[in-house]
Image (cartoon, coloured by chain):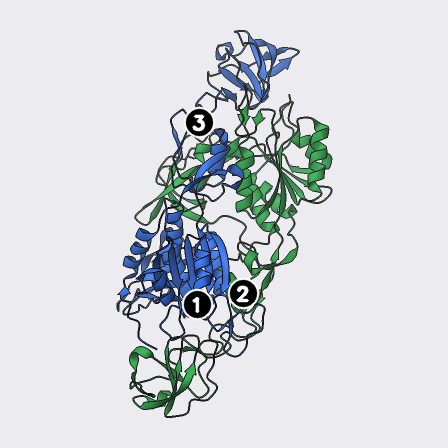
Chain colours: A green, B blue
Amino acid sequence: MRVSSYPLLDPDVAAALVLERTPVLDVEPVALADAFGRVLAEDLVADGFLPAFPSSAVDGYAVHAADAGQALRVLGESAAGRPFAGAVRPGTAARILTGGVVPEGADAVVMVEDVTLAGETVTVPAGLRAGSNFHPVGADLRPGERILAAGTQLGAAEIGIAAATGRASVPVRRRPRVALMSTGDELVEVGKKAGPGQIPDSNRWALLAALREAGAEIHVLGIAPDEPEPLRSLVVGALRDADALVTSGGVSVGTHDLVKPLLESLGTVLVGRVKLKPGKPFTFATLDGGGVAFGLPGFPVSSLVTFEVFVRPALRRMQGFAQLHRPTLPVRLAYDARPTLDRTEYQRVTLRREGSDLVAETTGSQSSSRLMSLAGAHALVRVPAGDRVLGKGSVVEAMILGLP
Amino acid sequence: MRVSSYPLLDPDVAAALVLERTPVLDVEPVALADAFGRVLAEDLVADGFLPAFPSSAVDGYAVHAADAGQALRVLGESAAGRPFAGAVRPGTAARILTGGVVPEGADAVVMVEDVTLAGETVTVPAGLRAGSNFHPVGADLRPGERILAAGTQLGAAEIGIAAATGRASVPVRRRPRVALMSTGDELVEVGKKAGPGQIPDSNRWALLAALREAGAEIHVLGIAPDEPEPLRSLVVGALRDADALVTSGGVSVGTHDLVKPLLESLGTVLVGRVKLKPGKPFTFATLDGGGVAFGLPGFPVSSLVTFEVFVRPALRRMQGFAQLHRPTLPVRLAYDARPTLDRTEYQRVTLRREGSDLVAETTGSQSSSRLMSLAGAHALVRVPAGDRVLGKGSVVEAMILGLP
């Protein structure tokens, strides 16, 4: 057993190093059906007018605005998808349905509620304005207009607008392929009885969920073998088809910890320890065969907090996200946030509204083993190293995991 | 063509009616690997202590605190998963690794950084405190303690803690099965050339994404037939295996709109119009065979806004979510939000930070056809019906879709 020889890096320095060494992945087309949550790789630019034709916003009659107050002869109908073939000349009108093409000649649409119908004659109200109740050509988009910027995550509206411009697929960045492994002789599979000194492997399932939220495709390697050679073969095999390796456990300095020596043999360990609580043993390496590796600590809270601070932004960088980090908001502390002298601390809090303020309450004991401190947490409050307490009532910028 | 005879309902009345008539779905077990995003159906309660044994927080030596400052004989090792078989008596110590069981007799752990080692003797510093550097039995959970409440959505930490207590699966509510259909003679499949008066079917893809985000399993029916009988057969078939039908288009009052008559023939139309902008033609029906139907307007923004206001909360109710609605936050308007006299309006805004404020800027023309007003929007600002402008600088509570 020895004291770690890795330098203790400032967490911001370590985070910058991780991003600097994490590659952005390739571009691939994705069908609209599978585009939800993906990240646009290129600006989307309109190549035509939207709408492409003057389109009625209501059910009613297409007319000349100058015919306001007149009785007009109804020539026919323009339904959605079934345009009226003729033209609307002064003194005439065409029935029109929502989404229908406003016929040639007409410059206004009157709502059905506002007309009086008698046989084939419709009387329209006084005071019509040209341009009423229809969407003119190009009202929504004109050729060359930027629709969406590269780096945008595709949600419902973004996918809708890509579809509205006729695209069946969009260019996105490939999802990162991540090999996920738990290490530790104490681990047993969930659902199996734990013997003396054993615990269920919980990190695998927590990290699987965190990786999924971050957009990764995951190859679960399970619990690592506790001998160096089988471990090495497993990892080398998995890395052939992975952009990143994520491990939990096995990165502290005990005699049985195998991850750091393994990463040293496969590449370059750039981060071996950070001034972070929880998460001091966090490890990051670049691999000689390409790809990167994240060695997360074994304690459940440490593994998820280092995931948030280092891994999630890196996975978002791989996918080309414009926004790599969680949003932040100012929160008012309802407790004294006591610092750790030599490490930046991420404290877990719940939020509640008080008037227009978000008030942050501690989730209780911040022990690195206590997942209850993270379950249901709405935010992480970053407490700088030192001896300055962030007193109750202080307003600090918190990393938002979810709003109350 | 006729004026609609459905009463114009207040949107809050309509929303309450929708939730009142939407059933909560059954409970099913889900494996941890598939639990991400699901909603817990029952409280999760601890049935044992966590940790189940006193567990070292560091690499070091398990000792008696009363032996502070002494040289102690090292008896053996307690590694994670490989407990030390003997007991630590006064004058002795055991090497211990992070996660290892603190042996019988020991009441403190000293970090490896703080000791002096000479052969099989370790000298520990003065001033040791009992209870240092290990997690006592039950520090994180005690039997009977509530771990997670029913209605909680399962994220990484929640899944982690379920695993830590040894569960391989958790009880969740079934995902709603939704049949999704677009209607409209003007629609063509994306990627195909649109003829005169035709437009690509964009709502299907936008709603598919919105449904996915809301947790649904989706059966895409495609573009509906434009004749009543084939349409009816398609829908009746799909409803055999669906909890809900979602349609877009075909709910206004034109001669070619088929959705409302169809829903009237299959069940009871409870909402036929709402005082909402965009989204006046929103329709909700209960179906005689069980299940519910949402008839969304055909304009892209109208369909997504009514999805947000009515459908998403209903789908969350089906899944047993404790929180049915989007979170809200106070935002300061950077524009004059002009109301509509007779309809509640949901205006789309982007947000930016100014000091500690969230400032809301309009996304531009709020036309119901203009998806660009919703793409990239961070929030919806609800503007009450009437003639009172919410002036620039007003602070209003906005429905948050995503933070900047």
Residue B156 image offset from top left, x and y in percent: 50, 39
Question: Rounded to the nearest whole Å, what is the CA distance between mark 1 and mark 2?
Answer: 32 Å
Quadrant occupied by the C terminus of chain A = top left
The local secondary structure at tag 2 comes to helix
Point out the tag, 1 or 3, that comes first from the N-terminus. Answer: 3
Marks 1 and 2 close (CB-CB < 8 Å):
no
Residue farthest toward the bottom in the current orientation of the protein: A90
Front one among B58 and A133: A133
Residue assigned mark 3 = B140
Q: Nearer the viewer, residue A145 or B297?
A: B297
Do the residues indicated by labels 1 and 3 lie within the same chain of the protein? yes
Q: Residue at x 55, y 62 (%)?
A: A149
> Do discs 3 and 2 belong to a common subunit?
no
Image quarter of residue A42: bottom right
* Amino acid type, residue under disc 3 in the picture: Asp
Could you tell me which secondary element the residue under label 1 belongs to?
helix
Please name the residue shown 49% across and 41% down the image.
B35
In the rendered structure, the residue with mark 3 lies on which chain? B
Label at residue A296: none
Q: Whole-percent x and y of residue B94?
A: 58, 13
Per the rendering, the mark at residue B229 is 1
Q: Which mark is residue A162?
A: 2
